[in-house]
Image (cartoon, rainbow, N blue to C red):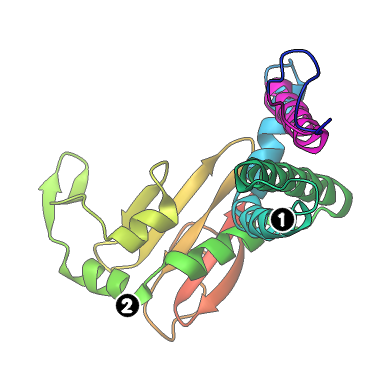
């Protein structure tokens, strides 16, 4: 009897390999998502996820893509149909993505490296257009508002929006035209990018980031992370 058929009704069923992979994926994501609703544990999981989020997003995606291809190739012997190999490869990629996140969180707990700074640096290098940001900053008009000078328009360049994502503050200094994109919270700290004129060194006083860990990714562009 064929492995993909049941004995009684003759209805096709998924091979054991596909069933096991599906079960592993369901259990793994159930544990990850379910732990967020457990008192105290959920807070720890939230903090860890926010700390490694940017690293997880890119490293996990790369690992998932590689695992998808490898899973597709390895499954050709046991899964003859492409309709069965595709869900197996997708589930394998999902499992690899979750495992990558768990490994990153565990490595942070063990080695206490600055995952925020590393991940956000990678994210900024991919999306930020420094010259377009400087051009935008020079052309923004300010008007007198209730609390001082305010930007006439709060629209920002697409690349700058992608760097900060929706949950971020984009601040533009009307005097120096320096741009600061900042996000985060009290539990995981704040991180962001500071775009200033080329050739200018890090100035923690003018940008109110005296205690921030910082790293220059190109001339006049700095990423930073603070603990508060």
Q: Which residue is mark 1?
A: 67
Q: Position of residue 218 (x, y in %)?
A: 50, 80
Residue 29 forms part of the magenta stretch: yes
The span picked out in magenta is: 12-36
Residue at 41% over, 68% down: 128
Whether the residues at callouts 1 and 2 have beta carbons within 8 Å, the answer is no
Secondary structure, magenta segment, majority class: helix
Would residue 133 be found to the left or right of residue 15 on screen? left
Residue 203 visible at all: no
Q: Looking at the picture, does residue 112 appear above or below residue 34?
A: below
Would residue 56 be found to the left or right of residue 221 on screen? right
- Give residue 131's mark: 2
Would residue 194 be found to the left or right of residue 17 on screen? left
Residue 222 forms part of the magenta stretch: no
Q: In terms of sequence position, does the residue under pointer 1 or pointer 2 come before the other?
A: 1
Of all residues shown, which one is farthest toward the front? 1
Q: Quadrant of residue 23?
A: top right
Q: Position of residue 224 (x, y in %)?
A: 56, 61
Spatial CA distance of label 1 from label 2 is 37 Å
* Camera-nearest residue between 204 and 132: 132
Q: Position of residue 13 (x, y in %)?
A: 71, 26
- Crowdedness of circle 2 by 10 Å Cα count: few (<14), some, many (20+)? few
Q: Looking at the picture, does residue 138 appear above or below residue 8?
A: below
Residue at 50% over, 56% down: 192
Q: Looking at the picture, does residue 21 appear above or below residue 7?
A: below
Q: Quadrant of the C terminus?
A: top right
* Camera-nearest residue between 111 and 27: 27
């Amino acid at each position: 009897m064929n492995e993909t058929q049941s004995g009684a009704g003759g209805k096709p069923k998924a091979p054991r390999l596909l069933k096991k992979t599906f079960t592993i994926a369901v259990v793994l994501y159930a544990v990850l998502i379910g732990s967020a609703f457990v008192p105290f544990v959920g807070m720890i999981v939230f903090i860890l996820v926010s700390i490694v989020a940017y690293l997880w997003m890119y490293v996990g995606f790369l690992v998932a893509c590689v695992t998808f291809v490898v899973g597709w190739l390895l499954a050709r012997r046991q899964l003859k149909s492409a309709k069965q190999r595709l869900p197996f490869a997708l589930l394998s990629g999902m499992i690899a993505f979750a495992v990558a996140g768990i490994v990153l969180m565990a490595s942070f707990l063990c080695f206490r490296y600055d995952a925020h700074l590393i991940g956000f640096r990678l994210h900024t290098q991919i999306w930020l257009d420094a010259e377009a940001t400087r051009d935008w900053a020079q052309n923004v008009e300010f008007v007198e508002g209730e609390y001082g000078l305010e930007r006439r328009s709060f629209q920002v360049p697409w690349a700058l929006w992608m760097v900060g994502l929706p949950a971020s503050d984009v601040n533009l200094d009307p005097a120096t035209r320096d741009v600061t994109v900042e996000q985060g919270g009290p539990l995981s700290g704040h991180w962001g990018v500071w775009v200033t004129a080329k050739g200018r060194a890090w100035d923690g006083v003018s940008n109110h980031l005296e205690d921030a860990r910082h790293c220059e990714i190109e001339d006049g562009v700095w990423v930073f992370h603070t603990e508060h």
